[in-house]
Amino acid sequence: MKNNKIFYLVVILIIAIFLVLLLGLKEEKNYTPQSELKKLNDSISLKDLYSGKNIFLNDLLLNNEFNLINIWASWCAPCKVEHPYLINLNDKFDINLIGINYKDNLDNSKKFLSDLGNPYDEVLVDNDGTKSIELGAIGVPETYLINSNKKIIKKFIGPLDQEDYDNIINLIKK
Amino acid sequence: MKKITLTLAILLTTVLIPPNSYADKNENIDYITKNLRCLICQGQSVYDSQSDFALSMKKLILIKIKEGKTEDEIYNFLKEKYGEWIVYEPEVNKNTIFLWGLPLILFIFGGLLIMRKVTIK
């Protein structure tokens, strides 16, 4: 009788452990930083892709408009995939679009924009990736929607897709 | 005479090297990056990782050290950008109090058990 009880307890324990591990498998393992509603650092300055002049990112953000910062590179294949969405956003909506070119060859990045079209109001260069870290980026592509108070209200990690595009439109139309 | 001059020169050079030398900065950056989690290769520290993110992070930390930022200031800056998860050693707050307190509770409990056993014997 006592042995039976122990046997059932062990079986229940094994099932419980199995269920916990099974639930654990479904959990998202990769950590994604949340930096929404954070104000941008005032001191971030980057070089303009075409003129080479140093520009403070804060000076480019318009006060009465939504701003979209997109971190991209010509060597990044997913950046090509999201590019048509950026072109559409700039064509159809009143949004200030700033591109940050990440760890790239300048000639390649200029060619990328002349071949695929330039959706950006301003293109800045982050040649060593440190400015993107200051923005809270982990790689390319990344896109931040910034409100008129210069706060990040939505962060898109990875290439923009139709869902993200609709999401951006809904947020700027609110 | 030459030997004395040479010895004096070596001694002076050693004394005149500022405490914030390249070697110190390098040791400091190694120490800080070992306590930072790489968000691309999430099983590795920024120190171990060779991802683009980790390489840029190392450069930025070196810039911050040169600017005179302290270790805590650098951690706080990165925690603000990436959240508490970026550091391996979590700070004590209401979410981590159990994590920090549990070993102490177990230690005290274990100690009391041992003391009780010894007293009974």
Image (cartoon, coloured by chain):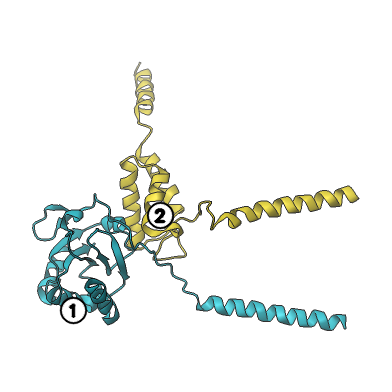
Left or right: residue A129 versus residue A122 is right
* The one of B10 and A11 positioned closer to us in this rendering: A11
Residue tagged 2? B79
Identified by mark 1, the residue type is: Pro
Which of the chains bears the disc numbered 2? B
User: Are there few (<14), some (14-19), or many (20+) residues within 10 Å of tag 2?
Assistant: some
- Residue ranking furthest to the top: B1
Position of A1 relative to B61 (above/below):
below
Residue B89: % across, % down: 51, 53
Residue A138: % across, % down: 34, 63
Left or right: residue B120 versus residue B13 is right
Q: Is residue A9 visible?
A: yes
Position of A11 relative to B78 (above/below):
below
The quarter of the rendered structure image containing the C terminus of chain A is bottom left
Which of the chains bears the disc numbered 1? A
Identified by mark 2, the residue type is: Lys
Q: Colour of chain B?
A: yellow
* The one of B62 and B7 positioned closer to us in this rendering: B62
Residue A24: % across, % down: 55, 75
Q: Quadrant of residue B51?
A: bottom left
Q: Colour of chain A?
A: cyan
The quarter of the rendered structure image containing the N terminus of chain A is bottom right
Q: Secondary structure at mark 2?
A: helix
What's the residue at 23%, 79% (across, down)? A81
Residue tagged 1? A84
Residue B18: % across, % down: 35, 31
User: Are there few (<14), some (14-19), or many (20+) residues within 10 Å of tag 1?
Assistant: some
* The one of B25 and A163 positioned closer to us in this rendering: A163
Position of B73 relative to B12 (above/below):
below
Q: Quadrant of residue A124?
A: bottom left
Distance from Cα at disc 1 to Cα at disc 2: 34 Å
